[in-house]
Image: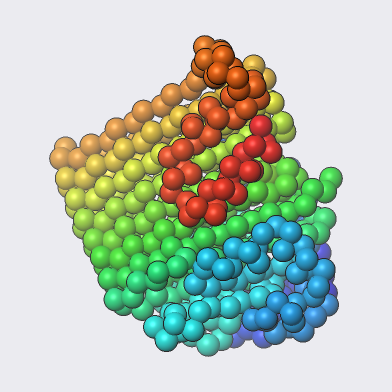
Amino acid sequence: MEIKGIDINKVKTISKIKGEDDWILDYRLDSFSKFEKLQMPSFGPKIDLNFEEIIYYKRNLQDDKIQSDWNNVLKPVVSELDDLGVLESEKHLGGMGVQYESEVIYHKMLEELENKKVIFTSIEMAMKEYPDLVKKYFGKIVNNGENKFAALNGAVFSGGSFIYIPPNTTLDRPLQSYFRINSKNMGQFERTLIIVDDNSSLHYIEGCTAPTYSESSLHAAVVEIYVGKNSHCRYSTIQNWAPNVYNLVTKRALVDDGGSMEWIDGNIGSKVTMKYPCCVLKGDNSSGTCITISVASNGQDQDSGARMIHLGKNTKSNIISKSIARNGGNATYRGKVLINASAKNSSANVKCDTLILDAKSKSDTIPVNACFNKTSSVEHEATVSKISEDNLFYLMSRGISRERAMELIVLGFLEKFREELPMEYAVELNQLIKRNL
């Protein structure tokens, strides 16, 4: 089944297919109304999309039930995911969910996590089985009217993950979701909602890929995370979208007293990326960290960064941004740090480094830093550099080829990001970087 183009009746059709309650349909219709009124972003790269040519919903011809056994998933899909390393990575995880086109097709979690009352399921299943819990947080951290693509997601969202970590619960292994676009002009609009209750911790990993088609595809996701008191959440993602995909994502976390949130965010592919993970440090003594990398090659605009909003006292934030521009690519850091008048004795640190590999590429740093009380501080540092011929000569004099020497310098440049990843994902990142140099 396929739904192409968007109007109010098609939004209703998506809701009907999913058998949703009235409150969800009302949210979709309100979002669609805002989508029609909102303008495209007034900043950043040019977005050239024909909304009537996008496929907003697509389901493969198989049982609607989410599978927990790969033997029950269509063999061509399993083979494709196996080639991408998805099946292999499951061995290292506490649970995995896989979305293919518009629907979650596979979901499994270790029994020991079920015994701990951890909930890890699709957002649609959570809306049916835990409606009160979902209602409490859904659409509260990211408002459906704050930008055109958040509104679009609210109207047509399909798939995505719901995670609830009960109080006083620590997970020894990460949970992972994997998202795959496999059709021309396909739009993917997953919705992720994560709640880490008080005195608990979670590491969540997300992976995304798509094949290359001449027609543009759209990925417009929304991620909402609530971090409870004295809790910790780490959200790691490596997105290797094909160079025909517009990757336009809204990610935000609300952090309570003593909580900490970490965004580890890698952007290797896509035609255009606009993504700025945000921490709202509401609670006293809360903290936020965002470590990002962006690799922009020919025809690519990577417009990324982070946002840190300090509201509570004694809050801390740290942004580390690493960008690489090659072969005419454009890598831009766009960030915002706001220390509110109420955020006494708070501090923020921003460090942006860009490596430009040739004369055709470019990079911009566009920070907005504001502090509204005298007991707090913001530090910002930015560097732009090229690979030194002296460094290349030094490595080549040791018998290393020029290509390998350049590769080693780039991998060293990204070391801060790589060291934050689990070993198997750091290895995958190395391979992706090598293929993109």
What colouring method underlies this structural image? rainbow
Q: Is residue 250 left or right of residue 66?
A: left
Q: Name the residue at 15% across, 40% down.
A: 375
The residue that appears at 34% across and 51% down in the rendered structure is 288
Question: Whole-percent x and y of residue 96?
Answer: 57, 71
Q: Residue at x 56, y 39 (%)?
A: 294
Which residue is more in the foreground, 151 or 287?
287
Q: Is residue 415 above or below residue 329?
A: below
Task: Residue 56: tell me if it is visible.
Answer: no
Split into 4 quadrants, where in the image is the N terminus? bottom right
Q: Position of residue 419 (x, y in %)?
A: 44, 45
8 vs 322, nearest the viewer = 322
Residue 423 visible (yes or no): yes
Q: Could you say where residue 80 lies in the image, as x and y percent from the top left?
A: 77, 62
Q: Considering only vertical position in the picture, is 370 above or below 145?
A: above
Residue in the image at 21% along x and 56% along y: 285
Q: Quadrant of residue 233?
A: bottom left
In which quadrant of the rendered image does the C terminus lie? Answer: top right
Q: Is residue 312 left or right of residue 194?
A: left
Where's residue 137, x and y in %?
43, 72
In the image, taking residue 353 as reference, residue 341 lies left or right, namely left
Q: Nearer the viewer, residue 324 or 36?
A: 324
Single out the residue that lies furthest toward the front.
Answer: 399
